[in-house]
Image: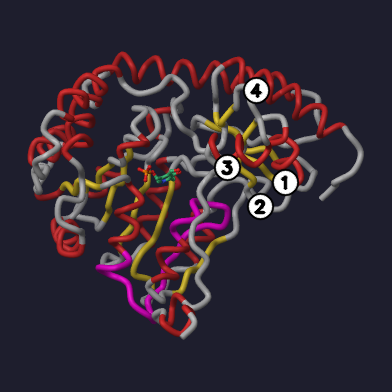
Amino acid sequence: MPLRNLLREPLRKFKPYTVGKSIDDVRREYGLIGRIAKLASNENPLGSSPLAVVAMRRAVEDVSLYPDDSARDYRAKIAARYAVAPENVFAASGSVEVLELLAVAFLEPGDVVVSSEKTFAMYALAAEKAGAEFRAAPMTDGGFRYDLEAMARLLDPMVKLVFLANPTNPTGTWFTAAEFDRFIERVPADTLVVYDSAYEEYASVGDLPDPMIHFRAGRRILLLRTLSKAYGLAGIRIGYAVGPEEIIQGLMMVRTPFNTSLVAQAGALAALDDVDFLRRSREHSDRELAFLREGLAGLPVTIPPSQTNFIFIDTGKKAGWLFEELQRVGIIVRPVGGRAIRVSSGLREDNERFVEHFRRLVLQPGAEA
Ligand SMILES: Cc1ncc(COP(=O)(O)O)c(C=O)c1O
């Protein structure tokens, strides 16, 4: 029997998330021997929090044992940070785990999920897997920024869940506290609003929302955070969610036992105290994004403002072509739609190479989108 017929109905046309290419993949595919610049997955080019590395090395000694299933210390630390109870905190194996578990616990065919176009692809995929309808609002400001007004117009009693990334991926833009306040007023009290703050550590604007204000006021808001980016811990898969007890209980019901590993819990606990690494990561990213912008100045491309550790470039060329041509010279970026690519703030030598090759390719005739 072909796979299609074995799968649950919502999965029959489902195309899974494609992750960014790995350095090894590209090395093998293109037969490259020199350095490969990986600017595709918004990882931390400075590595991992040194405090976390020490803690993880120590934790490795104990990996013959299962981890603490309740992740008690980690959840207590997060709870203290947000002045909530540990029952309001879910320890996640990367924040994407929460997106999956939300779908398993709360979504079924007939439910509706609202988000935006050009946002984190996992939102639509989580809805689709559960057989729920995904409604995406168009974007504003040149098609790069969430339009919360347009999103509010998509709300109706069938909408169970709203996914918001702020700042968002892949465009890097953000919405303000005032916009969020107006939006929340229009969201029915039962609807869960997921506020995914994966890049918050990189944001420096003063008008970002504090979703916890609405949570404390009794609204059904779930804050999602990751330690994959600014803390440099993408490889151990650790993140968390903070929100209403009934939502956390739903997530706990459907997770796999021991969902966060012993090494991940130890690394995360230490990383959260590493304010020095966080500051260095932020400063590095700010400096390198400024370098990329300067390097690309004068080209016929559009780069919206970003409050993250990456930039989105509307290139005018076919993104697939640019992606291939850059890989040929050992530079991995992320193609994100017809003519756009996303580029993470890498190390200076990698960014220099990217600027050099990207300038050459964009100014070369052909492959116009
Ligand atoms: C908006 C957004 N949310 C969540 C994630 C996933 O992070 P994690 O590594 O914690 O699963 C990403 C990673 O790219 C992201 O861009």
What whole-number distance in Å separates the C-alpha atoms at marks 1 and 2?
Answer: 7 Å
Give the residue type at disc 3: Thr
What whole-number distance in Å separates the C-alpha atoms at marks 4 and 2?
Answer: 21 Å
Q: Is residue 86 visible?
A: no
Binning the other alpha carbons within 10 Å of mark 3 as few (below 14), some (14 to 19) or many (20 upward) gives many
Name the mark nearer the viewer: 3 or 2: 2
Give the residue type at disc 2: Gly
| Residue 266 shown left or right of residue 345 in the figure | left
Tag 3 and tag 4, C-beta contact below 8 Å = no
What whole-number distance in Å separates the C-alpha atoms at marks 1 and 4?
Answer: 18 Å
x 46%, y 74%: residue: 133
Image height of 190 relative to 294, above or below: below
Give the residue type at disc 1: Ala
Dot 3 falls on a residue whose secondary structure is: loop
Tag 1 and tag 4, C-beta contact below 8 Å = no
Ranked by sequence position, the earlier of labels 1 and 2 is: 1
Dot 2 falls on a residue whose secondary structure is: loop
